[in-house]
Amino acid sequence: MRGHRDVGRTLLGSSIAFALAVACALCAAHFYEPPRMHGAPSTWFELDSICALGSGSIALGIGGFARHAASGAGAFAARSPAARLVLWAALTVLFGALWIESLFLLTLLIAPTHALACLRLIGLWTRWRTERRFRNQGPR
């Protein structure tokens, strides 16, 4: 019973963190300006770049934090690295298509990290759902 709550808490925390990562990406899109190459300070110190780095860092943090819980028994593709790789690539392309219009080159930072976080959320949700279903069935 405790494992169900732990996975549920991890799922909740990761979902909130993913919402924060998306908010940071939206902030980066709002402040995005094409890079100025002549006479400008470093591109990495502009507000859009800082927000994009924050978004990517939060998403990577989700990937690391939820790694074990999202790949345990009952999680989507728990024993299939190939299936996870294909899903990650598909999610990267999807997020790339969603962000390319507003973030241009910063999409190369945001799309793969958001895909990893989303993959972990899928794994956490499927594991939580499996454990909940198992707990509700009880011993027979």
Image (cartoon, rainbow, N blue to C red):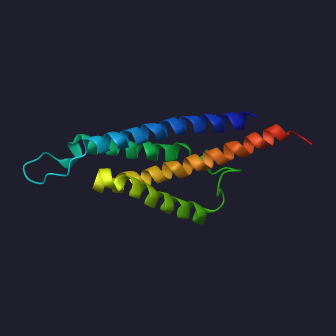
Residue 67 shows up from this direction: no
Q: Is residue 29 above or below residue 115?
A: above
> Horizontal placement of 72 versus 134: left or right?
left
Q: Residue furthest right?
A: 140
Question: Quadrant location of the N terminus?
Answer: top right
Q: Which of the 4 quarters of the picture holds residue 26?
A: top left
Residue displayed at 59% across by 39% down? 11
Q: Nearer the viewer, residue 75 or 32?
A: 32
Residue displayed at 14% across by 51% down? 36
Q: Which of the 4 quarters of the picture holds residue 133?
A: top right
Residue 85 is situated, as x and y percent measured from the top left of the image, at 54, 63
Give the number of marks: 0
Question: Quadrant location of the C terminus?
Answer: top right
Residue displayed at 40% across by 58% down? 97
> Horizontal placement of 114 versus 31: left or right?
right
Q: Is residue 81 above or below residue 74?
A: below
Q: Which of 92 and 53 is in front in this view?
A: 92
Q: Which residue lies furthest to the left in this view?
A: 39
Residue 28 is situated, as x and y percent measured from the top left of the image, at 30, 43
Q: Which of the 4 quarters of the picture holds residue 53?
A: top left
Residue displayed at 43% across by 54% down? 95
Residue 2 shows up from this direction: yes
Residue 111 is situated, as x and y percent measured from the top left of the image, at 41, 54
> Horizontal placement of 58 versus 10: left or right?
left
